[in-house]
Image: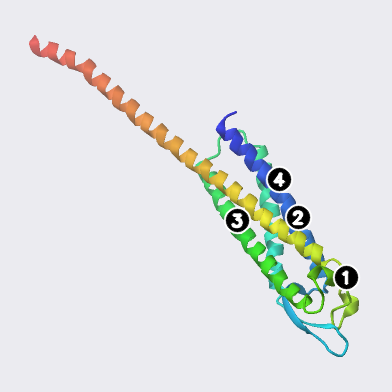
Amino acid sequence: MALGNVFLLSQIAGHVILVILSLCMLVPMAMSIHEFGGHCLLFTTGKWREEDGMFEANWSSTGLCDFPLFTAIFLFLVSTMQIYRFARMNDEASFLSLFVDVVLGIWMLASSILSAIMITLGFIVWCDGMTERFPSCETAAGQNIIHGDQDKIDTSGFYIEMGTAQFGAWGAFAISVGVGVIALLKLIQNHQVRNIKVSMYLERQRVVNQIDDRSTTPIISETNSK
């Protein structure tokens, strides 16, 4: 199998995995926001009330959850588009399309690593508040802990939801690295092939010119002798 076909199949497989991982980010994050009444769990702090033992949350900005959601949607759309494009690709990709693949790979890599860091650090901050009362963050899941608006907040699934979102984000980062490297290798290979073709054309023209010069030289010499 040609190297180009190996690269193409690897890209398709990588983007299929990215679609799955983006859903591992998108669905849990959306569920968490819905279950917490539109609030963002990440980087949320607070204190435990002495009188009723409830957690009075100092909710963080919703933008901290919106960015991982945007990243998940971005990865899903780009990967779906790339799978469709690669599956229908018959001719060799142009230099411009390969360059766009590299740029998209960089954006996917950067957004996924930022989302992974935000989810991980933000969840650690939340769990620090939970472990002030419970032995572990997992134990706090499902407990009636939020002060006020208890009927709008469901804490039963936050631990597994954030864990799944972390897995999706870090997995997407790892796969994005591989997809980006393959796109860069294809761009370098295309550039090398173009350089080789240009060099061969120039060398062929040089040889043709030398042959023409040799063929005309005897005729000129014979004419001078007469």
> In the figure, 207 relative to 144: above or below?
above
> In the figure, 31 relative to 220: above or below?
below
Disc 3: CA contacts within 10 A as few (<14), some (14-19) or many (>=20): many
Find the distance from the CA under tag 3 to the CA under tag 4.
Answer: 16 Å
Nearest to viewer (mark 1 / mark 4): 1
**Rendered-image quadrant of the N terminus:** top right
Helix, strand or loop at disc 2? helix
Tag 4 residue: 16
Residue at figure coordinates x 72%, y 61% from the top left: 166
From the viewer's perspective, tell me whether residue 106 is left or right of residue 221: right
> In the figure, 12 relative to 57: above or below?
above
Tag 2 residue: 23
Nearest to viewer (mark 2 / mark 1): 1
User: In front: 33, or 113?
Assistant: 113
Q: How many marks?
A: 4
Question: Which mark sits nearer the N-terminus, 2 or 4?
Answer: 4
Tag 1 residue: 142
Find the distance from the CA under tag 1 to the CA under tag 4.
Answer: 34 Å
Q: Position of residue 11 (x, y in %)?
A: 63, 42
Q: Which mark is residue 220?
A: none
Res. 186 visible in picture: yes
User: In front: 94, or 160?
Assistant: 160
Disc 4: CA contacts within 10 A as few (<14), some (14-19) or many (>=20): some
Q: Amino acid at mark 3?
A: Leu
Tag 3 residue: 109
Question: Which mark sits nearer the N-terminus, 2 or 3?
Answer: 2
